[in-house]
Amino acid sequence: MSSGNAKIGHTAPNFKATAVMPDGQFKDLSLSDYKGKYIVFFFHPLDFTLVCPTEIIAFCDRAEEFKKLNCQVIGGLGPMNIPMVSDPKHTTAQDYRVLKADEGILFRGLFIIDKGILWQITVNDLPVGHSVDETLRLVQAFQFTDKHGELCPAGLKPGSDTIKPDVQKSKEYFSKQK
């Protein structure tokens, strides 16, 4: 992987790039254009491969679910519901540490950003795509912790029990576990 500066809990690297927007128009955009929204920003390694289109189509098909969470998905293909950013010089890919420099291609990177802070990084090797369901769950969990200050156990779904961030108060959650 390339040595960029994307780190969990730190300011997400800003980017400026030309994107194809859902209406088919080209537009210059940057991370700061989405201030006040959660962002799911993903990279795909190569065009015209077998896995990339499945991942891109899955996110495009479910873009409305993300919009309901005040979350913008960035990265896409063809007739789409999300902007697709061009990174011909791999500058953004380097900043987000997804460039496989020896081959000049990208790993499958997925990043969740809120208020300019990078909260989640998933980088997969080329043969395995990302899960839209898991990405939605993560956005919901980060939004919950941001709003309520409670902790989210593994596999949290909306409405599930959460953990109070205090040793004594957390016993309430753990006493219900079998």
Image: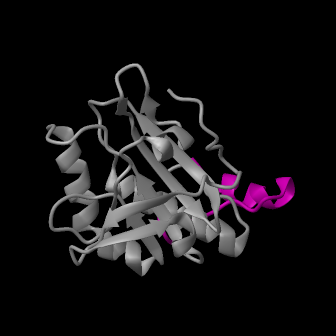
Q: Is residue 128 magenta?
A: no
Splitting the image into 4 quarters, where does residue 169 fall?
bottom right
Q: Is residue 160 visible?
A: no
Residue 90 in sight from this viewpoint: yes
Q: Position of residue 124 (x, y in %)?
A: 39, 34
Q: In the depicted view, which residue is nearer to us: 121 or 22?
A: 22
* 172 drawn magenta: yes
Magenta span covers which residues?
A: 157-178
At 40% across and 51% down in the image, what residue appears?
A: 42
Residue 6 at what x, y percent from top left?
61, 44
Position in image of residue 94 (x %, y %) = 51, 38
Side of 134 relative to 54 (left or right): right
The quadrant holding residue 86 is bottom left
* Image label count: 0
Q: How is the image coloured?
A: one colour
Q: Nearer the viewer, residue 62 or 161?
A: 62
35 versus 61 height, above or below = below
- Give the residue displayed 40% in from the left and 19% down from the top: 102
Name the residue: 53% across, 65% down. 31
Task: Return the x and y of residue 98 as percentages of the image width and height.
Answer: 46, 36
In the displayed structure, would residue 114 be above or below residue 101?
below
Q: Is residue 87 above or below residue 105?
A: below
